Structures are given as structure tokens and as C-alpha cells.
Amino acid sequence: MVIRERANVELIRVIDGDTILVRYTCPACRISFEKRVRLAEIDAAELDGPERGQALLAREQLAGLLTGRNIWIVPFRRGEDCYGRIRARVFTDEGDVSRLMIDRFKTPLYKPLQGSKLIV
């Protein structure tokens, strides 16, 4: 199943500083599935890369923004990337999580990605 429009999701876990695993339940058919979501416009350091300390910090910061909150996503590209993730804007009641990561945690490990387009 694919998430094609705004969807309320349940956080299962934060994988790294720019990827989360969520559970989505289709409101029409009540079927649930898990999906990895790549946050729009940020590119956190990799856990298996030379900046592991920064990557762990980014994952912790993202978890702090998402844990225990209402979360919804808005996909901005059709289909999945080469890692099987959908790319989407992720929101909480506080706003766009990518923007919160950039604005609150002003560190060089977040680099805006080129070509992000929000599907509405």
C-alpha cells in the first residue's frame, strides 16, 4: 500500500536523524501497514559514517520532537526512494518537523535538499 495524501500516522520508531518508521491505517479499509518515511529538506549525518556522534544527536533530537505527539505526513514525491522510503513533510502540532530541526538545532549536519515540492 502507498500513502498518497495527507495521513495521520503513529510513530513506531525514529531510525535516524531524517528517517522514521510509522504505522498508517487506511481509514476506508482499516488495513494497517508500516512505512519508512524520509523527512523532506533535511539530510542528517549517517549513523555508520564518520560523524556518528552528530548522527546519534540528530536521532535524539528528532525523537524529542515526535515522541508522544500527534503526527501526520504529506508525501511530496510519488513512489519510494532506492531504500523503500517515501519522502514526505512530517508535521506535529508544533509545525513542520524539518523546519523545526533546522531552526532549533542550528548545526551543519542538516543540509536542505534540492527540488523538494509539496503535493497538495
Image (tube, rainbow, N blue to C red):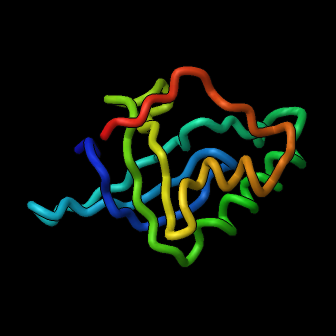
Taking 84 as reference, is 101 left or right? right
Q: Residue furthest left?
A: 29
Taking 28 as reference, is 57 left or right? right
Query: Which residue sits at x=41%, y=36%?
Result: 118
Q: Quadrant of the N terminus?
A: top left
Query: Which residue sits at x=60%, y=36%?
Result: 41
Figure disc tally:
0
* Residue 90 spot, x, y in % from top left: 49, 52
Query: Where is 17 relative to 86, above or below?
Result: below
* Residue 104 spot, x, y in % from top left: 77, 57
Query: Which residue sits at x=75%, y=62%?
Result: 60
Instruction: Work out whether residue 88 or residue 24 is closer to the camera in this orientation and state it.
Output: 88
* Residue 23 spot, x, y in % from top left: 37, 61
Q: Residue furthest top?
A: 115
* Residue 51 spot, x, y in % from top left: 88, 38
Q: Quadrant of the C terminus?
A: top left
Residue 52, by quadrant, is: top right
Residue 110, by quadrant, is: top right
Query: Which residue sits at x=73%, y=47%?
Result: 102
Query: Where is 44 relative to 92, above or below?
Result: above
